[in-house]
Image (spheres, helix red, strand yellow):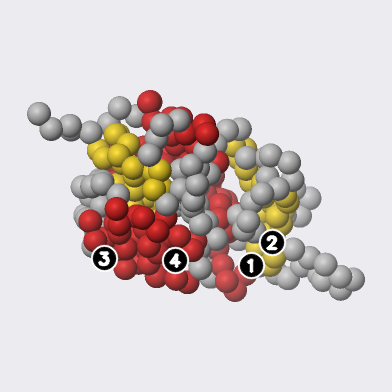
Amino acid sequence: MSDPRVRLLIHGASGRMGRSLLALLAEHSALHLVAAVANAPRADMGALSVLRPAQIAQAPDFDVAVDFSAAAALPALAEACARRGAALVSGTTGLDAAAEAALARAAERVPVLWAANFSLGVALLAALARQAAAALPDWDCEIIEVHHRRKLDAPSGTALRLGEAVAGGREHCLADQARHGREGPHVPRQRGEIGFHAVRGGDVVGDHQLLFAGEAEVVELSHRALSRDVFAGGALRAAAWLVRRAPGRYRIEDVLGL
């Protein structure tokens, strides 16, 4: 009798998020791990057989890949998923043009879900940010994000997602409105700009705050992640949902029905 579970490949298995995915797998009985890909195995990965990124073509058959790696490694994985007809869930941030193009090509053949954040709370926060921006079109908006000292990209992918929500609520283009930090003696705030401020330190999992400032009043929306399990659990839920969907691009909001 064949195994009815979804065959899962974890890409970036030795990283912080990869280890969280492995730890949570027991809570997702519909998923069965068949392969893990990492730059190097770790002692805490036990007897798990680990492939190097260059060995992705040697992976056994899988139905869906969950990726938390690096932008440079994503194109090869996306190509492998498209070739094998496997769905792709990715939370890798700091994507360059090559990685973005690879996701677009893969989505022509398989279902692809990329998200900067797989938290239900963040998905709700983005929806609230869009609503607030539309309701308060003349209020100033600033986005502050805090992450651990090892994070490579700034601002965070989640902060940019929130900025897109604010810009969308006002029917603006984020690229035209974004302002990344302020420095110098003559940097007055421009009307309509969306400010981004990145803070790095310690082992902070992820804090995001939006400030909508009007005349004599301020509205604050915020989300704090207390464990990476929030993101890992959401990614595994998305993996089980995405399998057997039609080719195309999907959002975490689609999984959650928001």
Residue at the extreme right:
185
Residue 220 position, x and y percent, is 67, 44
Residue kind at label 1, given as amino acid type: Ala
Residue kind at label 4, given as amino acid type: Ala
Lower sequence index among marks 3 and 2: 3
User: Which secondary structure, mark 2?
Assistant: strand
Mark pair 3, 2: CA separation:
35 Å
Lower sequence index among marks 3 and 4: 4
Q: Are marks 2 and 1 in contact (CB under 8 Å)?
A: no
Quarter the N terminus occupies: top left
Of residues 150 and 222, the one drawn nearer to the viewer in this rendering: 150
Q: Residue at x 73, y 41 (%)?
A: 202
Residue 163 position, x and y percent, is 58, 59
Q: Quadrant of residue 234?
A: top left
Lower sequence index among marks 4 and 1: 4
Mark pair 1, 3: CA separation:
31 Å
Label 1: few (<14), some (14–19) or many (≥20) C-alpha neighbours in 10 Å: some
Q: Quadrant of residue 248?
A: bottom left
Residue kind at label 3, given as amino acid type: Glu
Tell us which disc is closer to us: 3 or 4: 4
Q: Quadrant of residue 175?
A: bottom right
Mark pair 2, 1: CA separation:
6 Å
From the image, tell me which residue sits under label 3.
Answer: 108
Mark pair 3, 4: CA separation:
15 Å
Tell us which disc is closer to us: 2 or 4: 4
Above-or-below relation of 136 to 17: below
From the image, tell me which residue sits under label 4.
Answer: 99
Q: Which mark is residue 178?
A: 1
From the image, tell me which residue sits under label 2.
Answer: 195
User: Which secondary structure, mark 3?
Assistant: loop
